[in-house]
Amino acid sequence: RRKKIVQECEKLMGKPDQIRNIAIAAHVDHGKTTLSDNLLAGAGMISDETAGQQLAMDTEEDEQERGITIDAANVSMTHEYEGKNHLINLIDTPGHVDFGGDVTRAMRAVDGALVVVDAVEGAMPQTETVLRQALREGVKPALFINKVDRLISELQEGPQEMQERLLKVIRDVNDLIRGMTDDMDDVGDWTVSVEDGTVGFGSALYKWGVSMPSMQRTGLDFGDIIDLEQADKRQELHDQTPLSNVVLDMVCEHFPDPLDAQPRRIPRIWRGDDESDVAEQMRLVDDEGEVVLMVTDIGIDPHAGEIAAGRVFSGTIEKGQELYVSGTAGKNRVQSVGIYMGGEREEVEHVPAGNIAAVTGLRDAIAGSTVSSIEMTPFESIEHISEPVITKSVEAKNMDDLPKLIETLRQVSKEDPTIQITINEDTGEHLISGQGELHLEVITQRIERNQGIPVITGEPIVVFREQPTGACETVEGISPNRHNRFYITIEPLSEDLVETIQLGEASMDMPELERREALQEAGMDKDTSQNVEHIYGTNILIDDTKGIQHLNETMELVIEGLEEALDDGPLAAEPVQGCLIRLHDARLHEDAIHRGPAQVIPAVRNAVHRGLVAAHVKLLEPIQNVRIDVPNEHMGAASGEIQGRRGRVDDMYQEGDLMIVEGIAPVDEMIGFSSDIRSATEGRAQWNTENAGFQVMSDSLQGETIMEIRERKGMKTELPEGIDYF
Ligand code: GDP
């Protein structure tokens, strides 16, 4: 049977109009995994009985144990729609906010996103996040309202109430979609509706589902659905309209095929020359064009080693090809190509444009790489969307394991680029930085269990930022030999500009004209936008100098000095963000020997640090939005848990029989929240957090926190000269 499916898939791979690349995305626990299993069972990939128990897509052991999906996994299946067989490539996305980077990468590979929402809970914070991630990538949404059985059995709702509730979910989701697509002129009306058939609802657990087309076909109405409490009725409906058919019909009918999607998506995700041959080949899904693969995931196979999975946008990928990997120097040779069936990979001869491929041999590729047969502009980077906010040290318990640990950490950061690994040179400790406490916990457990390396981990530590709060007068940086001088000013970058950079709408990878336009649109004046020399993190270097001899050939070193200064800010050696640095003037020694790295780098670094101090640099800490759902009697305890953590409660309201408490709190204070809230509410609270960027710490905490960080890092425990404003 399996062999037959693989052969069928291979046949369909060459017919882009019969392909749909899709993701299922949801707030945690809304039923994404159960629904995915239904689809797999419907496609004959797993047995109907085990769907819902097998959790076929949660391949990592810890995912099944925790009952949440962590890694994005891939699976292909076939489905007959309107007399034609279709190939459906499904990419699973993690449901926890700590793994946001994986969601964004999964969205890059697909053209349609089925958003699953729990009928009782409605749209939740993570629903909004995944929708935003999908729309930003030009991925078309459809909606499946799940757990409708709960409306009947738990809430005892009648047809009228039930209909109202479903309509409210649809309205809420549409409000989100409308808000997010408002300024997107490359998409039409992407709101969903029952009438269009872009909304389905049902129960993944009891394996039934309906949509308008299926209701029309079978003559069912809401009254019939209420009767579903009786098991035999349920079986009847399942037999008439199995959930997998309803959902996969919806997928085939409403999601774009690659031919339809790629012309629209390519300009959104790739900033290369749109008049080049390769641009045309990607828009046309040309399987005879240059090979272009966007890697969305790196996995490990015990036999085959590293596997790079991703979307083929053009050409046909096959064994033996020598391909460029973005960001690296050489080429890699393709050792095998395959497709995913459940958690397993099946080797095939070749994978043409428009499909998801699993490739071995691409040893330099990381999640996010562009792999291609010609040297080309890489796809827009997607890592910037989630910056790490928390760090933990790891050490091998046994020194003998050290090489294995280093290798594993290297691997981990390849698989998940939202993880950053750094080595503390002084202590020899390895530091892992990630999206939240759970993110790091899962990673370290994986090292221990999968690799069998016992490790000692330190307490989680929050990652801070430094940012100027005002503008400064010109400051000077002088080289050790005193023959080179740099004159700069620093000012804070506006929020609009920071966001433009964060979203990748202005970057050094893109053609200059386009970058200028994007910066001007975000409020930068024309002259300044023409002098942009470098963008680093969310910082911009402007070269306002004119005709300075040797500056061009020295610029690389200037940039190196700038980056060093911004990596380790003057307050506590934390990364600097949101500044505009203007180079006004420079004196350079005639002789190249006297303006080498040892002179220029420290001169620029000093200038930038002095400028930052003069521009009232302050320490920022990461903050999180917190939402807690609790029974009324625990509401006080729940809001107390936020307020007691230097947090703020913004809203409290009733939803169904629960109270919702919404607020904001520093990440630092949220460490250990999960056990505290459990004991404060007798385990009755459901909660959710989402990173919400960085916030300037109050002046009263600045000095103390800076000292704590400096002490931890083994730096001098005194404030840098000139800091007397706290
Ligand atoms: P995910 O976190 O979005 O992948 O959610 P899961 O598929 O793991 O489901 C979370 C929980 O909800 C599990 O206990 C499921 O059995 C349950 N569940 C999923 N679908 C339904 C449904 O349609 N009705 C009911 N009552 N429970 C469901």
Image (cartoon, rainbow, N blue to C red):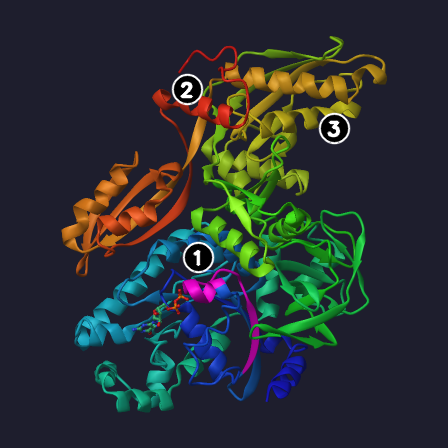
Q: CA distance from mark 2 to mark 1?
A: 38 Å
Identify the residue under disc 1: 130
Pointer 2 local density, CA inside 10 Å: few below 14, some 14–19, many at least 20: many
Label 1 CA crowd tier, 10 Å (few <14, some 14–19, many 20+): many
Q: Does the stretch in magenta take in 66?
A: yes
Q: Amino acid at mark 1?
A: Val
Label 3 vs 2, first from the N-terminus: 3
Say which label, 2 or 1, has the lower sequence index: 1
Q: Quadrant of ligand 1?
A: bottom left
Horizontally, is 718 left or right of 540 in the view?
Answer: left
Q: Is residue 186 visible?
A: no
Where the N terminus falls, by quadrant?
A: bottom right
CB under 8 Å between discs 3 and 2? no
Cα separation, mark 3 vs mark 2, equals 35 Å
Secondary structure category for the residue under label 3: helix
Q: Would you say 314 lies left or right of 460 here?
A: right
For the residue marked with disc 3, what is the amino acid? Answer: Glu
Q: Amino acid at mark 2?
A: Gly
Q: What residue is drawn where x is 37% and y is 21%?
A: 699
Work out how far the residue at label 3 is from the one at label 1, CA to CA, in angstroms: 39 Å
Residue 42, how many percent across, how many down? 47, 83
Q: Which residues are magenta?
A: 62-78
Q: Which residue is mark 2?
A: 703
User: Percent from the top left, x then y, of residue 658?
Assistant: 19, 57
Residue 86 shows in this picture: yes
Does any atom of ligand 1 lie closer than 8 Å to the CB of label 2?
Answer: no
Q: Secondary structure at mark 2?
A: helix
Label 1 element class: helix
Q: Point out the residue furthest to the left here.
A: 633
Pointer 3 local density, CA inside 10 Å: few below 14, some 14–19, many at least 20: some
Q: Quadrant of the C terminus?
A: top left
Marks 3 and 2: which is nearer the front?
2
